[in-house]
Every structure is written in C-alpha cells, then in structure tokens.
Image (spheres, rainbow, N blue to C red):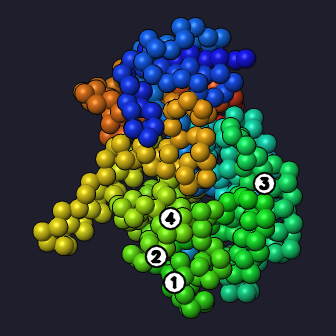
Amino acid sequence: MASLLVKNVQLLATMDGARQEIENGGLYCENGFIKQVGLSSSLPQTADEVLDLTGYLVLPGLINTHHHFYQTLTRAVPAAQNANLFNWLKTLYPIWARMTPADITTSTKTALAELALSGCTTASDHLYLFPNSSRLDDEIIAAKEMGLRLHASRGSMSLGESKGGLPPDSVVDTEEAILKDSQRLIEQYHDPSPGSMTQIVLAPCSPFSVTGELMKQSAHLARQYGVHLHTHLAETQDEEAFCEQQFGHRPVAYMQSLDWVGQDVWFAHSVWVNKDEIDVFARTGCGVAHCPSSNMRLASGIAPVWEFLSAGVKLGLGVDGSASNDSSHMLAEARQAMLLARLRAGIEGASLSGSIKPILTARQVLEIATIGGARVLGRTDIGSLEAGKCADFIAINLNRLEYTGALHDPLSAAFFCAPVKVDYTVIGGRYIVKQGELISLDLPNHIQKHKKAAQRLMGG
Ligand SMILES: [Zn+2]
C-alpha cells in the first residue's frame, strides 16, 4: 500500500462543499486516493512518502476542458496571426494535413508538459484530423507516458468544401470510417471507473465541418456506451450566420434538432448565446468549456460567464488549441478568465446606466477551473481535495518574486499576480512535477524534437 502524507501547508484550498481553506493543513493519501484532509496535527504522522510544504499554497489539480494538443506545432504561424476563425482555419488546414503519427506523439507531450507545469492534472483534448495514418491512440499512449489524466475526444470532419463545408476535402473522412474508429476506441480505452486515467469522448468538430447525420450517429453511439459528447459551438458570429443559412437554425437550436443536448454534452466556447439558449444549457445539463484567450486571440467575442454561472450552467475552463492561444498555461488562462469577465461586466454596466454588474472573483475562477471542469467532464472523483477523491493536487511556493506583497491572501495571489509555473503537480499520488521539474520527460531534448517537427511542417 503506497501512502503519501502532505503536511504543514501554509494554505490548503479544498474546494469541498463548504469551500474550506485550511491554514497549516495537509492531506493523507493511500493508493492514489485521499483518505484524510485537515490540520496537519490531525493527520497520521508518517507515510511511505512525506512531503513537507511549509510556505506553500496547495490547490486541487486544475482541469482543462478544451484543447487541441497537435496545434503546439503551429503556434504564431505568420499567415494565421491576424485572422479570424474561418480564415485562420483555412490557412492552417493544409499545414496540419502534413502531420504524421510521430507529430501527434511529440505535440501531445509538449502540451501536457506545459499543462502539468502550470497546474493541470486532467486534460481533455480534441483531435479532429488524422492525416498520414495518425490515430487517437498516438495521443493516448503519449499521455499515459506523461502521467496526466486524459479525456481523449475522437474528433472528426466529414463535410468538405465540395459539400459546402469549410475544410478542404483532403482532411475529411467518411462517416462510416469515423464511426467504426470511434467504437473501436471506446471499446479499447474508455475507463469510467473512479480514478480513471483515460476516457473517450465523441467529438465531431463543429457545425461547419460535419454533417447533421454524423452528429446524430455519434450521439447514438456515445449513448450506447455512456461516453460524453463534445463539439465547438456558438464560437463566432460567422458560425451563427453559417448555421442560420445552411440549417435554418441558430447553433443551439441546431444542436437541439440533432439530439445533442443533455448531461453528457459539453460545448467549447459558446460565446454567441442568448438568454433562452443559456436556459437550454441549464435545463438540459449541457456544459461549457470557456476559452478566454482563444476568444480574444481570434477576436471571437466575450462569453457570458456571469450569465452561465447565474443560470447554473456547468462551466469549465479550457486553454483551447495552441494555434489560437498560443500557450497551454492553465493558471494564465484562469487569470485571463477572471479579467475578461470583469471587462464584459464593465462594458455592460456602462451601457445599462445605473446597473452594477457583478465582478468575478479569484475564488470563483478557481471553482470554474477545478470542480466546474470536473462537472463538465462528468466526473465526481476529481476537482476537490476531499476524502475519497483522487490525490490530484498542485503546490506553489509562496516565497517568490511574483507574489511578494500579495500574501495577505495567498489563494488570490495565484490568480491576480503574474502566472507562475507550479512547484509540484501530483496526480493519483504520483509526482508529475517535483521541485519545479517535470519528472516524466527530458524537456531539453524534447524541445529540440518538437522544434524540428514544427519546422518540417511549415517547410512543406
Ligand atoms: Zn477548439
């Protein structure tokens, strides 16, 4: 039995039902799960491994609900730097079409390294093109080596340019092949048990790159196996116009017409949704992955975060793909979410004279990035530090330049001050980051490998 005792934590934020924050706290874990949380003095005094975190802040591991790992290979591509979503995609599709299975492995490791070093313990990824015989397996195997929990979304594109879609025909697949591979992946990898390291999600890419029939068939298959459904939705006004023109519906109504609403569905972005549509999400249980940096980078708009929270919509945080962020830094994304929601509140408050809009707090952002994400992914075993949950946590040394002057409130320092790399990331009781170093990857060598792969893709 492997046990881990974490003691003397300056401040431990549990995110439990009472949102307890414990000074001089700690955790006692066995076999990857938390057995006890409380004051250091109340915990067993020894274990196989003892970690003294005097002077550290401990938070539940952050949960990333939307990403495209492969895009780490195409960050800041000059021709796609100053484009909106549709033009950005059209520029990048031909570059992505050159990817190989080795590129999927390499980019997965890069993204997971950045995520782990910025406090993430569970990541969802959305891979939706499979050129040159690459497969979702390439990503799943790489994530297992890295030690992060992965919700691997089997993405797909079936509506090429010749049929009125956005992507070139060369990167779309047949619906028969997509569904067959989706079923294979669920049967081979999906593990719904507590402490699961790998879950499969079915994720046709977006309304403008798949047919309604594939959406329906994917939902049917997902529900046969009890796996979640994910897609991009209501990201831009262009998409809204496309849906109205092509399907005679706004994006959310289109999803309703395809049986794509429910507790098992979450959407990335959902920037352009009105009050009635937010109510549909709340009533049916659809979750949202909020991706503030990407929405700013592509000039998509500002998602109605406060309205989602007020209506009781399940809300998680996502860094989105690294070609539209161009980073996988979870703490930075949380900070961005807090600031952007305040900007929207300010703009709306100014336009509605006399109305004072609420301000999103650091603690609310932490909630979105932890238990909010867990709810979006349909998990009850992660997102907070409580007995019975996975031993997934991060620790940040508070004695650092970025936080000096902010330690009257160490938790808020992590979100108000400049985003830092964490000192410890522990997943299922195992060190992934220890004393600021990534354990499962030789980072200097890996960076060279990733650079070469990116250069090859750009070179054609
Ligand atoms: Zn995305």
Q: Left or right: 339 with respect to 54?
A: left
Image location (x, y in percent) of residue 218: 75, 70
Label 3, label 1: how many angstroms apart (C-alpha)? 31 Å
In the rendered image of this protein, does residue 65 appear above or below residue 40? below
Q: Which residue is mark 1?
A: 250
Residue at image point 50% right, 14% down:
43
Label 2, label 4: how many angstroms apart (C-alpha)? 13 Å
Label 2, label 3: how many angstroms apart (C-alpha)? 32 Å
Asked whether 458 or 286 is in front, the reply is 286
| Sequence-wise first label, 1 or 2 | 1
Cβ–Cβ below 8 Å for labels 1 and 2?
yes
| Sequence-wise first label, 4 or 1 | 1
User: What SS does tag 3 mark?
Assistant: helix
Q: Which residue is mark 4?
A: 269
Q: At label 4, which amino acid type do we have?
A: His
| Sequence-wise first label, 3 or 1 | 3
Dot in front, 1 or 2:
2
